[in-house]
Protein backbone atom coordinates (compact mmCIF):
# COMPACT_ATOMS: atom_id res chain seq x y z
CA UNK A 1 0.00 0.00 0.00
CA UNK A 2 1.59 3.28 -1.08
CA UNK A 3 1.74 6.51 0.88
CA UNK A 4 -0.97 9.05 0.03
CA UNK A 5 0.33 12.61 0.23
CA UNK A 6 -1.38 15.95 0.51
CA UNK A 7 -1.22 17.90 -2.76
CA UNK A 8 -1.92 21.65 -2.68
CA UNK A 9 -3.67 21.70 -6.04
CA UNK A 10 -5.95 18.73 -5.25
CA UNK A 11 -8.31 19.75 -2.47
CA UNK A 12 -9.48 16.23 -1.62
CA UNK A 13 -5.94 14.93 -1.23
CA UNK A 14 -5.89 16.01 2.43
CA UNK A 15 -8.90 13.78 3.08
CA UNK A 16 -7.29 10.92 1.15
CA UNK A 17 -4.05 11.28 3.14
CA UNK A 18 -5.81 11.40 6.53
CA UNK A 19 -8.17 8.56 5.65
CA UNK A 20 -5.27 6.32 4.61
CA UNK A 21 -3.34 7.19 7.79
CA UNK A 22 -6.33 6.18 9.93
CA UNK A 23 -6.69 2.89 8.05
CA UNK A 24 -3.04 1.98 8.62
CA UNK A 25 -2.72 3.58 12.08
CA UNK A 26 -1.49 0.41 13.78
CA UNK A 27 1.18 -0.11 11.10
CA UNK A 28 2.35 3.51 11.40
CA UNK A 29 2.62 3.20 15.18
CA UNK A 30 4.44 -0.14 14.93
CA UNK A 31 6.86 1.14 12.26
CA UNK A 32 7.69 4.25 14.32
CA UNK A 33 8.26 2.17 17.46
CA UNK A 34 10.67 -0.12 15.59
CA UNK A 35 12.50 2.77 13.92
CA UNK A 36 12.81 4.70 17.20
CA UNK A 37 14.21 1.62 18.94
CA UNK A 38 16.67 0.99 16.08
CA UNK A 39 17.84 4.60 15.92
CA UNK A 40 18.10 4.82 19.70
CA UNK A 41 20.13 1.61 19.84
CA UNK A 42 22.39 2.79 17.00
CA UNK A 43 22.98 6.11 18.73
CA UNK A 44 23.91 4.37 21.98
CA UNK A 45 26.51 2.24 20.19
CA UNK A 46 27.67 4.99 17.80
CA UNK A 47 26.62 3.02 14.69
CA UNK A 48 24.98 4.31 11.54
CA UNK A 49 21.82 2.67 10.24
CA UNK A 50 21.21 2.61 6.48
CA UNK A 51 24.34 4.75 6.08
CA UNK A 52 22.58 7.83 7.45
CA UNK A 53 22.72 9.60 10.78
CA UNK A 54 20.49 12.45 9.60
CA UNK A 55 17.36 11.22 11.35
CA UNK A 56 17.70 10.98 15.11
CA UNK A 57 15.35 8.83 17.22
CA UNK A 58 14.14 12.07 18.87
CA UNK A 59 13.02 13.34 15.45
CA UNK A 60 11.03 10.16 14.96
CA UNK A 61 9.46 10.51 18.40
CA UNK A 62 8.01 13.86 17.36
CA UNK A 63 6.27 12.12 14.45
CA UNK A 64 4.44 9.67 16.73
CA UNK A 65 0.81 10.61 17.39
CA UNK A 66 -0.73 10.03 20.80
CA UNK A 67 -4.34 8.96 21.33
CA UNK A 68 -5.64 12.53 21.43
CA UNK A 69 -3.90 13.43 18.18
CA UNK A 70 -5.31 10.33 16.46
CA UNK A 71 -8.77 11.35 17.71
CA UNK A 72 -8.28 14.86 16.29
CA UNK A 73 -7.23 13.32 12.98
CA UNK A 74 -10.34 11.14 12.99
CA UNK A 75 -12.64 14.13 13.60
CA UNK A 76 -10.87 16.22 10.98
CA UNK A 77 -11.20 13.39 8.46
CA UNK A 78 -14.94 13.14 9.14
CA UNK A 79 -15.22 16.85 8.42
CA UNK A 80 -13.27 16.61 5.17
CA UNK A 81 -15.30 13.57 4.10
CA UNK A 82 -18.37 15.78 3.46
CA UNK A 83 -16.41 17.78 0.89
CA UNK A 84 -15.06 14.64 -0.73
CA UNK A 85 -18.59 13.24 -1.00
CA UNK A 86 -19.85 16.48 -2.56
CA UNK A 87 -17.03 16.47 -5.10
CA UNK A 88 -17.60 12.82 -5.96
CA UNK A 89 -21.35 13.32 -6.33
CA UNK A 90 -20.95 16.19 -8.77
CA UNK A 91 -18.07 14.54 -10.64
CA UNK A 92 -19.43 11.03 -11.16
CA UNK A 93 -22.86 11.81 -12.52
CA UNK A 94 -23.58 11.38 -16.21
CA UNK A 95 -25.20 14.51 -17.58
CA UNK A 96 -25.65 18.08 -16.36
CA UNK A 97 -25.19 18.82 -12.65
CA UNK A 98 -25.99 22.52 -12.45
CA UNK A 99 -29.37 21.80 -10.84
CA UNK A 100 -27.63 20.21 -7.85
CA UNK A 101 -25.23 23.08 -7.10
CA UNK A 102 -27.43 25.03 -4.69
CA UNK A 103 -28.53 21.89 -2.89
CA UNK A 104 -24.89 20.85 -2.46
CA UNK A 105 -23.88 24.31 -1.21
CA UNK A 106 -26.79 24.31 1.25
CA UNK A 107 -25.81 20.91 2.60
CA UNK A 108 -22.17 21.99 2.99
CA UNK A 109 -23.16 25.25 4.69
CA UNK A 110 -25.48 23.39 7.09
CA UNK A 111 -22.69 20.97 7.90
CA UNK A 112 -20.16 23.80 8.40
CA UNK A 113 -22.61 25.67 10.65
CA UNK A 114 -23.23 22.58 12.79
CA UNK A 115 -19.54 21.82 13.01
CA UNK A 116 -18.61 25.42 13.85
CA UNK A 117 -21.26 25.48 16.59
CA UNK A 118 -19.87 22.24 18.02
CA UNK A 119 -16.35 23.66 17.92
CA UNK A 120 -17.51 26.96 19.41
CA UNK A 121 -19.18 25.12 22.28
CA UNK A 122 -15.94 23.28 23.01
CA UNK A 123 -13.92 26.48 23.40
CA UNK A 124 -14.39 28.66 26.46
CA UNK A 125 -15.41 32.09 25.13
CA UNK A 126 -13.81 34.05 27.96
CA UNK A 127 -10.37 32.50 28.10
CA UNK A 128 -10.18 30.89 24.66
CA UNK A 129 -9.20 27.61 26.30
CA UNK A 130 -10.68 24.22 25.52
CA UNK A 131 -13.02 22.44 27.89
CA UNK A 132 -11.59 19.22 29.28
CA UNK A 133 -14.54 17.16 28.00
CA UNK A 134 -13.95 18.09 24.37
CA UNK A 135 -10.61 17.76 22.61
CA UNK A 136 -11.26 19.89 19.54
CA UNK A 137 -8.37 22.32 19.31
CA UNK A 138 -8.98 26.00 18.72
CA UNK A 139 -6.93 25.87 15.54
CA UNK A 140 -9.54 23.56 13.94
CA UNK A 141 -12.25 26.15 14.71
CA UNK A 142 -10.17 28.80 12.95
CA UNK A 143 -9.63 26.49 9.98
CA UNK A 144 -13.38 25.73 9.84
CA UNK A 145 -14.16 29.46 9.80
CA UNK A 146 -11.64 29.99 6.99
CA UNK A 147 -13.21 27.09 5.11
CA UNK A 148 -16.66 28.65 5.47
CA UNK A 149 -15.32 31.95 4.14
CA UNK A 150 -13.88 30.16 1.10
CA UNK A 151 -17.15 28.31 0.53
CA UNK A 152 -19.03 31.64 0.75
CA UNK A 153 -16.70 33.15 -1.84
CA UNK A 154 -17.56 30.42 -4.35
CA UNK A 155 -21.25 30.47 -3.41
CA UNK A 156 -21.40 34.20 -4.21
CA UNK A 157 -20.58 33.29 -7.82
CA UNK A 158 -24.07 31.72 -8.10
CA UNK A 159 -25.66 35.14 -7.60
CA UNK A 160 -26.68 37.96 -9.94
CA UNK A 161 -27.03 37.07 -13.63
CA UNK A 162 -25.60 33.58 -13.09
CA UNK A 163 -28.27 33.02 -10.46
CA UNK A 164 -30.96 32.94 -13.16
CA UNK A 165 -29.23 29.98 -14.77
CA UNK A 166 -29.06 28.10 -11.44
CA UNK A 167 -32.71 29.01 -10.70
CA UNK A 168 -33.94 27.76 -14.07
CA UNK A 169 -31.92 24.55 -13.89
CA UNK A 170 -33.18 23.81 -10.38
CA UNK A 171 -36.86 24.52 -11.15
CA UNK A 172 -36.74 22.53 -14.41
CA UNK A 173 -35.23 19.47 -12.71
CA UNK A 174 -38.21 17.13 -12.14
CA UNK A 175 -36.62 15.71 -8.98
CA UNK A 176 -36.36 19.15 -7.33
CA UNK A 177 -38.77 21.69 -8.85
CA UNK A 178 -39.44 24.18 -6.03
CA UNK A 179 -38.46 21.90 -3.14
CA UNK A 180 -35.09 23.64 -2.58
CA UNK A 181 -36.85 26.98 -2.23
CA UNK A 182 -39.66 25.65 -0.02
CA UNK A 183 -37.19 24.37 2.59
CA UNK A 184 -35.17 27.61 2.59
CA UNK A 185 -38.27 29.82 2.61
CA UNK A 186 -39.75 27.92 5.56
CA UNK A 187 -36.46 28.33 7.46
CA UNK A 188 -36.41 32.03 6.58
CA UNK A 189 -40.02 32.45 7.73
CA UNK A 190 -39.38 30.70 11.05
CA UNK A 191 -36.21 32.76 11.63
CA UNK A 192 -37.95 36.07 10.98
CA UNK A 193 -41.19 35.14 12.71
CA UNK A 194 -39.50 34.29 15.99
Image (tube, grey):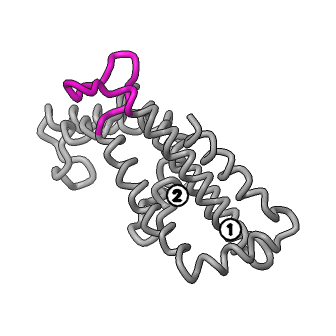
Residue at position x 74%, y 76% in the image: 169
Q: Does 149 sit left or right of 74 as displayed?
A: left
Residue sticking out furthest to the right: 174
**The C terminus sits in image quarter:** top right
Q: Position of residue 168 (x, y in %)?
A: 73, 77
Q: Hey, which quadrant is residue 89 in on the image?
A: bottom right
SS class of the residue under badge 1? helix
Residue at image mark 2: 2
Closer-to-camera residue (169/83): 169
The residue labelled by disc 1 is 90
- Mark nearer the viewer, 1 or 2: 1
Q: Tell how many labels.
A: 2
Residue 5 % position (x, y) = 43, 60
With 190 as the anchor, is 125 left or right in this view? Answer: left
Determine the residue positioned at 63% across, 45% down.
Answer: 189
Q: Is residue 54 above or below residue 34?
A: below
**Cβ atoms at labels 1 and 2 below 8 Å apart:** no
Q: Is residue 163 left or right of residue 97?
A: left
Task: Find the residue positioned furthest to the front.
Answer: 193
Q: Residues within 10 Å of mark 1 (few under 14, many from 20)?
A: some
User: For the stretch drawn in magenta, what is the main secondary structure?
Assistant: loop
In this rendered view, identify the residue nearer to me: 145 or 165.
Answer: 165
x and y percent of residue 191 in the render? 56, 41
Q: Vertical placement of 147 versus 25: above or below?
A: below
119 or 186: which is nearer to us? Answer: 186
Magenta extent: 120-138
Q: CA distance from mark 1 to mark 2?
A: 27 Å
Does 20 lie within the magenta span?
no
Which residue is at the far top?
133
Task: Tell me residue 147's x, y (percent).
Answer: 41, 55
Is tag 1's residue or tag 2's residue first in the polypeptide sequence? 2
Amino acid sequence: MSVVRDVKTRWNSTYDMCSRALRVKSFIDEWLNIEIANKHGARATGQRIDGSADIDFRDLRRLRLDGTEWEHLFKLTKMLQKFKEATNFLSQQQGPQIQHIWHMYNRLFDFMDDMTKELDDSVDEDSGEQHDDNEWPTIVLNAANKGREKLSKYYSKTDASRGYLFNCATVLDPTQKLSVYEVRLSQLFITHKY
